[in-house]
Amino acid sequence: MNLPADSRAVHVRAPGKINLYLGVGGRQTDGYHELATVFQAVSLFEDVTATLADEITVHTTGPQAHDGVPTDDRNLAVRAAKLLAHATGYRGGAHLEIYKQVPVAGGMGGGSADAAATLVALDHLWQLGLTLSELHELGSQLGADVPFALQGGTAIGTGRGDDLHPALATGRFDWVLLTSSRGLSTPEVYARLDSRREENSLIFPLTPEVPPVVLQSLRGGFPEDLAEALHNDLQAPACELRPELADTIRHGVVAGALNAIVSGSGPTVALLCGGADEAAAAVERLREAGLRGQHVHGPVHGARIMNASPHDE
Ligand code: C5P
């Protein structure tokens, strides 16, 4: 049976991300920091299925669904739906069913992926016909990482991180993720970086730049080169707030990773491996040490309509 377009469930998949490089500059008057970052979208996804409803409601399932995810207006998918309705004058609602695989408050942009997927799903379901740049503009009002979740691939982010320029990356990179059951608050991690910089009168570039070596290593496609170029200014404050992260990083390197880095504001640790076989071997060694690593790869696509329920695939 062919249903009319607006009564079908629209399923959109959006990726989580790793920051391969994250340079944090000065704090602006709005509280945000000037960034120079390189994002890579990885094969850990959020699936949002939207159906027509009178109100805007959300329900979350999946391995990363837990009570800490709000279902009211603090939920980024709900905020995305309301912003889209407000911006376009759309008067109806939608129910959003989220299958969550990206850790909550994990530094991998899970909430941003939910918002990006919701914008794309509702643009289609509500037949609004917005352009990608209009969706990006709405996305950046919701969070600095939302435009990247829309775009995917590998990209340089400047400004708040939402001013995106594509970065050329050759081949695929294999990562093992070590997630944590407790999230870290992004504003707290930034605040810890600020206070350390102040206390120690540290000198840092107010407007940071991505070092050319990072982009060269991505173009070359050799994980060994990228491993040397990985850097995150938020890693030290994240490790101060969560001291066991230093052990996690050490375990990752002992398990055979080329290098390990805290993703974004943490606490997820991303291990860069030499290839798919090396990643599988690292997962096995971590398992023997009692740690659960998850093998993913990047770059992958941004928010994309899948046209089916996630569980039908
Ligand atoms: O944009 P988003 O809501 O994801 O950011 C969460 C928090 O991270 C902000 O409230 C801010 O404290 C911090 N942040 C920042 N500078 C950025 C991006 C995020 O200070 N460029």
Image (spheres, helix red, strand yellow):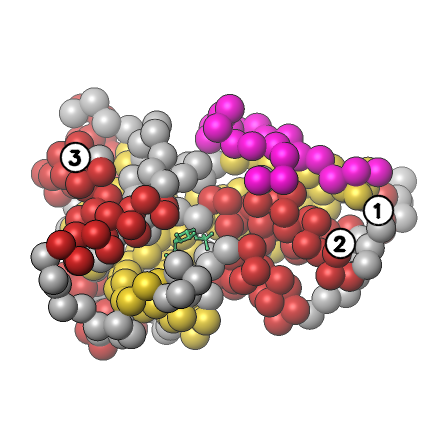
**Residue at disc 2, CB closer than 8 Å to ligand 1:** no
Q: Quadrant of residue 216?
A: bottom left
Residue for point 63% across, 40% down: 73
Residue type, label 2: Ala
Q: Is residue 210 magenta?
A: no
| Disc number placed over residue 243 in the picture, else none | 3
Relative image position of residue 270 (x, y in whole percent): 27, 46
Label 1, label 2: how far apart the Cα atoms are: 8 Å
Q: Give the main secondary structure, helix, strand or loop, of the magenta stretch.
A: loop
- Residue 87 can be seen, yes or no: yes
* Nearer to us in this view, 161 or 74: 74
Closer to the chain start, of discs 1 and 2, is 2
- Residue 12 can be seen, yes or no: no
Query: Is 232 left or right of 7, judged from the image as shown?
Result: left
Q: Is residue 67 above or below residue 147?
A: above
Q: Quadrant of the C terminus?
A: top right
| Disc number placed over residue 136 in the picture, else none | none
Secondary structure under tag 3 reads: loop
Query: Is 174 left or right of 70, judged from the image as shown?
Result: left
Identify the residue position indicated by label 2 in the image.
85
Identify the residue position indicated by label 1 in the image.
92
Q: Is residue 26 above or below residue 280?
A: below
Q: Quadrant of residue 298?
A: bottom left
Label 3, label 1: how far apart the Cα atoms are: 47 Å
Q: Is residue 31 above or below residue 214?
A: above
Residue type, label 3: Pro
Relative image position of residue 99 (x, y in whole percent): 57, 35
Residues rendered magenta in the picture: 54-74
